[in-house]
Image (spheres, grey):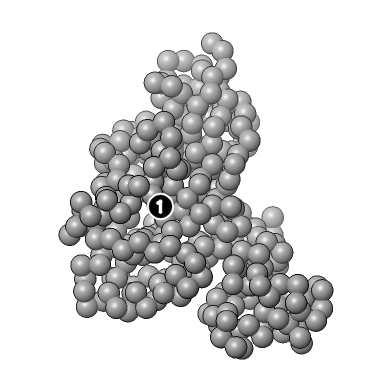
Amino acid sequence: MGVDKGTVIAAHGRHYLVQAGATRLHCVTRGKKSDVAVGDIVQLKQTSADQGVIEKIEDRKTLLYRSDQYKSKLLAANLTQLFIVVATEPSFSDDLVSRALVAAEAGGIHPHIILNKTDVVESLPKARERVALYAGLGYPIHEVSARKSPEETIAVLEPLLRGQSTILIGQSGMGKSSLINLLVPDAELATREISEALDSGKHTTTFTRLFMIDDDTSVIDSPGFQEFGLYHLTEGMLERAFREFSSHLGNCRFYNCHHLTEPGCAVLSGVENGEISAMRHALYQQLVHESSQKLY
């Protein structure tokens, strides 16, 4: 059997499900290396009717991943968009939202914030106030209610998805699964099939999976997570990933300014005069500290 090309649609441990034309193959990599991500275009060798070996990963346009002190975890490759799902209730984490925005900026992926559960009217003003910070930075905010207004939700989000490769991320409880079920026909059925093919049984929410809507449009669902480590980003990458820093960069007294405590720092001046949010600058400080702790 010759070498084929396919798209990785799910990953569980070192096992991958690859869509190659009309065929779905259960694949492994050669050796112990497992740096394959959902969304990767791969060259593979079919070894039986439903199995194959991944020979090579094609060049990626983008790669989104998170990392802690010890290792990195690939989320998805060849993305064009990131939907960060937040909700009126339960309360969402600003730290997670800002980290996801930084990861998107660093990875060349366009982020959108989806504010779900707008039908919970008593919590809506506070949620709007909190996402206003990100709107002020130029990030698009889209208000939806997946459960109460499904048709309107589809009308808002479907045009944004068209022709894009989009990953949805968010903490547990934000309604991400409800959105996936609205946007992806037969998502639950497809997830069950993928889970069985990967032999991951009941752990259907512990792996990332890609759904093809049409030839140009895909939606990727990721497990809910509470932390988004960015230990892999260097200080230079971080300062450029905070878009509100951009007009201040290059104006510091010292050319190698770290924007932490230095005198004559234009970024710190921006924080003092309210042009840069103190919360966002505190996150920048934290991320710079994390990047210095990396052990791999």
* Residue 218 location (% of width, % of height): 41, 39
Q: Could you tell me which residue is drawn at 41 percent across and 25 percent down?
A: 24
* Residue 43 location (% of width, % of height): 58, 25
Quadrant of the rendered image containing residue 61? top right
Pointer 1 residue: 168
Q: Classify 264 as above or below 66.
A: below
Q: Could you tell me which residue is drawn at 46 percent across and 15 percent down?
A: 48
Quadrant of the rendered image containing residue 212? top left
Which of these two is toward me, 176 or 276?
276
Q: Classify 48 as above or below 141.
A: above
Task: Please say whether residue 253 is visible from this viewpoint.
Answer: yes
* Residue 4 location (% of width, % of height): 54, 19
* Residue 123 location (% of width, % of height): 26, 76
Which of these two is toward me, 242 or 220?
242
Q: Classify 267 as above or below 200.
A: below
Q: Could you tell me which residue is drawn at 58 percent across and 52 percent down?
A: 108
- Amino acid type, label 1: Leu
Q: Could you tell me which residue is drawn at 33 percent across and 74 percent down?
A: 127
